[in-house]
Image: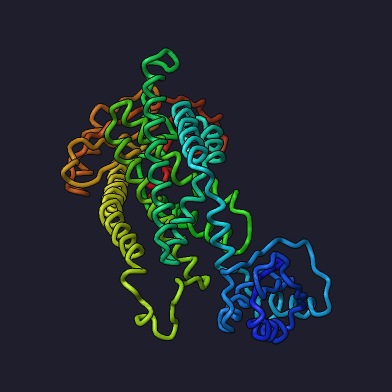
Amino acid sequence: MRLIRTLIHENDRENVVAVLEDENIDYVIYEESSGRGDLLVVEFPVPEQALEVVLARFDEAGHDEHAYTVAADATSALSENMGEVEDRFVVGEEEDSSIAVEELRSQVLGLLPDAFTYYLLTCLSAIVATAGLLLDAPALVVGSMVIAPLVGSALTASLGTVLAERDMIIKGFRTQLLGLGLAILGSIAFGYALKSGVLLPPSLRPSTTAQIAQRISPGLLSLVIGVCAGAAGAVSIATGISAALVGVMIAAALIPAAAAVSVGVVWAEPTIALGALVLLAVNAASIHVSGVAVFWFLGYRPTGWNPGSPLSSISIRQYAPSFVVAVALLVVFVTAGGAVWTHVAFNYSANVAVEETLSQDQYDRLELVGVQVGFNPGPRFAESQQVTVTVRRPTDESYPRLSERIRKQMVAESDREPTVVVEFVASQRTPLEPGTKNRSNVEGGAVRPGGRGAPAL
């Protein structure tokens, strides 16, 4: 529920009252007491779903609501016609869950804290995420997402693109890019401090850490995460729902990837740094695109937009910032998206090659544990790419030529020549008692290949 106060001239009184009575909205009118001429204050309660309709009717009647209009939260409103208005706009034929564009703009800009607070919290969240990645602690990674204030910059840029407001576009993108840049630099400094001190063991290999491995191999599911995060943020803010929880989802798509970039830089692991950077770029672009799409779907349009003749309402001066954003996003998707697609294709080929190799009779006592494919942005980087295959084997057998055979199969499947590393996990199981039915694919203390994992995207 909203309580609206708007300032009108005596000459506009008849038109404004006609709109309110036509919409069956109860109102009060009283004189403005500052002595600034023939001004009146009109006050009326209205459901938030009806606010945009009323303001649009005011604009058609010649009243400029931007001169002075305040929309305040109201717990409830008891008036003669309020029940009928709620039936129309809340549960009736004119039901619309989206809020007015003026209110939406205010709420989105309100999600942006002051510059010092924003950059400090973003940097701190990336440092916490870096610690969580290195310690392989999911709780720390999740905690870093909670304190990251990235939802404001993401939604400001998206809404500014839809409304073609240059100031919102610049503020949103500048805040987000500077914030992520400072987060990466802060995490790099933190990583060097850890590496040069005695806080981490010298034998630490970041590429073997599960939390890092999940963020250096971007795939199609990474794109889904970014799209869902941006769409959820736009829906939550446009329908008047708190965006705090959705902000965690947006941070989940950005902060751990930024922290992984810093880990790759500090430990001189270009595969980690490049893979995480591509993931960060794809997620940031997909969040923006999905946010723009949702805002547009909910009916938000630039000022002066003519739905009957869209081309006639397009002004190069007004829409130039939105066009620049569209071109920039296209470049990001063509470059980063192409790299992701290339990596996904090779990742699939590598998993198929491993499966086909282990399906041979001489490897029937091996069990595939997992396949980790280093990020591969294209053929020119193929020589530096590494594929790590982890298999479980019995303690009494060895397979010295397994890596060579897997590599040959990968070359046949993909025309790439990666480095294949096979890590063996030795295991021993007690044999079954005579007459006991085999329910676990165990025979003579060895694991049979009945349950290999499917390749992940």
Depth check, front residue: 326 or 210:
326
Image position, residue 307 (x, y; %): 44, 82
Quadrant for residue 40, please give it.
bottom right
Quarter of the picture containing the N terminus is bottom right
Give the image location of residue 87, x and y in percent.
74, 78
Q: 196 left or right of 128?
A: left
Left or right: 416 as drawn, with respect to 80: left
Location of residue 162 (image quadrant):
bottom left
The residue under the point 70% across, 81% down is 20
Q: Which residue sits at x=49%, y=56%?
A: 155
Name the spot of residue 288 as percent of width and height, x first.
42, 57
Q: Position of residue 2 (x, y in %)?
A: 70, 66
| Residue at x 35% of width, y 42% of height | 217
Q: Is residue 88 above or below residue 245?
A: below
Q: Nearer the viewer, residue 247 or 100?
A: 100
Q: Is residue 103 visible?
A: yes
Q: Quadrant of residue 387?
A: top left
Query: How many numbered discs?
Result: 0
Q: Residue at x 37, y 28 (%)?
A: 188
Q: Give 361 or 378, whichever is nearer the viewer.
A: 378
Task: Report whether residue 449 is seen.
Answer: no
- Left or right side of 376 for 143: right
Q: How is the image coloured?
A: rainbow
436 is higher (above) or lower (below) than 53: above
The residue lying toward the viewer, choosing from 327 and 7, is 7
Question: Residue placed farthest to the top in the image?
Answer: 198
